[in-house]
């Protein structure tokens, strides 16, 4: 096949894209490039899917699956999520356990790839790959960094912002005990000043809970920095785990926390 000649089939179109190092496309793009009808292109793509050559993580959006990823039945999520978010016109950042992993804090491979978006979306499935979307309204304000992937750039929350997301969404992070364990490695390269700056972007109880855990695991510099913020911003005493009942444990006055769960991080 001449790589410069216009493709006359969906398979030729896919081969030409891969030869140029591009691994995502839309149904409309394939139809327009090959001169075929959308119905004919969809039928051709179904045949390519059965052969494991392409996958569709989202309706009308497809990825090319090279041989090294055929066992996944899809590209790895970091190689198509940024392109999918651009296709959908959605602001996003990789978050929670997935972000922690990129910052070197992960004791095991996360079961899902976690992405923060502004509004709730259903979990996406592509082969064995699962992408879980978590909603946070002010994502445009959250500190992020751009990381390079084999297919382009990906937006990931900073270590400091990740710490707040983990404490704010513990049900998506393996619980508070796992969060306490992750904080030790996550904040190795973080900055106490940036942690305090990020506090203003989250509810005050998140800072109270995070400060309590930072003190618990011995991250004194970060705890002290956050302590000044909590002293001026926290208005009431809150439960360490808001999903559980209150306890008669003594209140932690510094953080205005009721420690209604025992935390024993695996350090």
Image: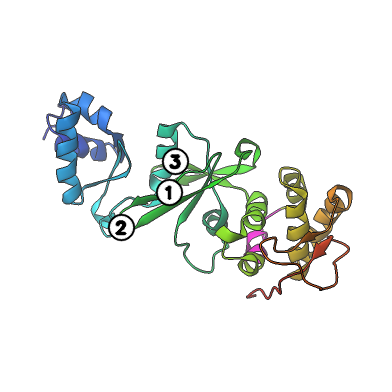
Residues shaded magenta: 182-190
Answer whether residue 22 is visible to the viewer in this image: no
Q: CA distance from mark 2 to mark 1?
A: 13 Å
Q: What secondary structure is found at the residue carrying circle 1?
A: helix
Q: Residue at x 53, y 55 (%)?
A: 102
Q: CA distance from mark 2 to mark 3?
A: 18 Å
Q: For mark 2, what is the residue?
A: 72
Check the image and report above or below for 32 versus 243.
Answer: above
Q: Residues within 10 Å of mark 2 (few under 14, many from 20)?
A: some
Number of the label disc, if any, that sits on residue 82? 3
In-front residue for pair 168/143: 168
Q: CA distance from mark 1 to mark 3?
A: 7 Å
Quadrant of the frame with the N terminus: top left
How are the colours assigned in the image? Answer: rainbow
Quadrant of the frame with the C terminus: bottom right
Task: Please tell me in which quadrant of the rendered image residue 41 appears.
Answer: top left
Total residue callouts: 3
Are the residues flagged by discs 1 and 3 in contact, CB closer than 8 Å? yes
Q: Residues within 10 Å of mark 3 (few under 14, many from 20)?
A: many
Tell whether 51 sits left or right of 74: left
Q: Does the segment drawn in magenta span residue 147?
A: no
Are the residues flagged by discs 2 and 3 in contact, CB closer than 8 Å? no
Q: Residues within 10 Å of mark 1 (few under 14, many from 20)?
A: many
x then y, percent, for residue 204: 77, 49
Q: For mark 1, what is the residue?
A: 78
In-front residue for pair 63/174: 174
Q: What secondary structure is found at the residue carrying circle 3?
A: helix
Are the residues flagged by discs 2 and 1 in contact, CB closer than 8 Å? no
Q: Does the segment drawn in magenta span residue 189?
A: yes
In-front residue for pair 239/89: 239
């Amino acid at each position: 096949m001449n790589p410069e000649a216009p493709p006359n089939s969906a398979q030729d179109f896919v081969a030409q894209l891969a030869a140029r190092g591009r691994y995502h496309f839309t149904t409309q793009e394939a139809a327009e490039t090959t001169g075929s009808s959308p119905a004919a292109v969809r039928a051709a793509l179904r045949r390519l899917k059965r052969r494991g050559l392409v996958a569709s993580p989202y309706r009308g959006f497809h990825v090319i699956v090279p041989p090294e990823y055929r066992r996944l039945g899809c590209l790895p999520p970091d190689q198509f999520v940024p392109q999918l978010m651009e296709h959908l016109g959605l602001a996003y950042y990789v978050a929670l356990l997935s972000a922690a992993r990129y910052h070197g804090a992960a004791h095991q491979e996360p079961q899902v790839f976690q992405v923060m978006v502004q509004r709730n979306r259903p979990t996406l499935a592509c082969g064995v790959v699962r992408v879980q979307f978590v909603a946070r309204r002010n994502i445009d304000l959250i500190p992020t960094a751009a990381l390079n992937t084999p297919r382009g750039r990906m937006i990931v929350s900073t270590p400091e912002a990740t710490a707040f997301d983990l404490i704010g969404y513990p049900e998506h992070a393996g619980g508070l005990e796992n969060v306490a364990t992750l904080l030790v490695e996550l904040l190795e390269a973080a900055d106490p000043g940036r942690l305090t700056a990020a506090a203003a972007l989250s509810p005050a109880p998140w800072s109270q809970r995070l400060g309590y855990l930072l003190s618990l695991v011995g991250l004194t510099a970060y705890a002290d920095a956050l302590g000044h913020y909590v002293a001026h911003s926290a208005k009431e005493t809150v439960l360490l785990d808001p999903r559980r009942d209150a306890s008669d444990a003594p209140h932690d006055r510094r953080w205005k926390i009721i420690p209604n769960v025992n935390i024993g991080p695996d350090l």
